[in-house]
Image: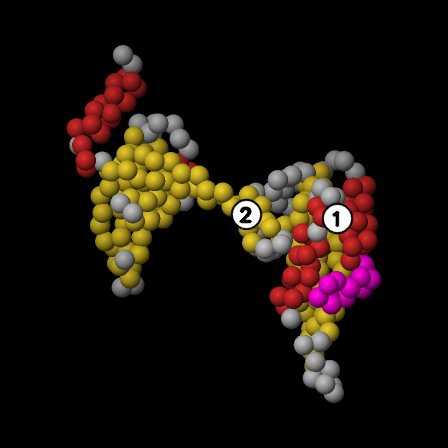
Amino acid sequence: MFDSIRSDIYSVFASPSWVATGIKAYPGNYQGTISNKNEFARISIIPGRSQFDSHNLTKTLTGILTLSVFVKTGAGDKRLFEIADLLDDIFEGKTLQNGTQFSSSALNVIGLDRDDPALYRGDYTITFNKFGE
Amino acid sequence: MSLRNKISKAVDAVFVKIGDLAVDATFTNKTVTDFNFSSGEVVSATATLVKKVVVEEKINRSQEQPTVVTTLMTKSTGEDFSVYTTVTVNSVVYNIISIADDGFLVNATITRSV
């Protein structure tokens, strides 16, 4: 179930429609080159509580998908909000191919990045559910 | 002739005189350049550099685990050795632990498990 969720979410970032946005995204535990240091996103898939449904013993898993969005410092926050809207178009209220269901999103504007003040950061978060198995 | 050139030529002469004691070593730098969301794996590129080196090998023991610690020496020719993470000598792959370049000679400490 866990890898099915990961695969579902990764498929979004592999899709031509995401690639067409020009925004590079990188997963957790990626330490390689960032091709555009002025604008990128880091993906964190955080599985949360799970439970068996009472009768048929199928499992339900909830979790949070967080995209830490980085834009250039000093250029205002417009781009950050635009990217959040783009992410809403893809995730909010949607069900992905493997059945991962997303609910409503939030955007937490962090401000200057602690590790690199040349970047302005906002965390886009959205909860998900996966039923079955 | 400047002192720098004199030393550089002396280093060249040493590598000629030791003949086949100097062996070819391949320094390898693996750089992760991107992430492929379709395969779920990183995309990496490998760059190599071949140099004549002299090696001196000894075996250390740490917590009863024998480790080969090798000192490697080669002529400095201006490359940035800080990017290389492994070196292959006589078909054996070593990890580069530390490397120092004084402009004439490059000295590296490399290790491998036995």
Letter of the chain that mark 2 sits on in the rendering: B
Q: Quadrant of residue A96?
A: bottom right
Where does the image place residue B41, in percent across and percent down from the top left?
Answer: 56, 54
Q: Is residue A46 visible?
A: no
Q: Which residue is mark 1?
A: A17
- For label 2, the crowd category at 10 Å Cα-Cα, with few meaning under 14, some 14 to 19 and many 20 or more, is some
Q: Quadrant of the C terminus of chain A?
A: bottom right
Question: Is B111 left or right of A58, judged from the image as shown?
Answer: left
Is residue B3 among the parts visible in the rendering? yes
**Closer-to-camera residue (A11/B84):** A11
Nearer to us in this view, A115 or B42: B42
Q: Is A68 rendered above or below residue B12?
A: below
In percent of width and height, residue B94 lies at: 33, 48
Left or right: residue B114 compared with residue A61: left
Amino acid type, callout 2:
Val
Residue ID for mark 2? B43
Residue B5's spot in the image, x, y percent? 29, 18
Q: Which residues are magenta?
A: A92-107
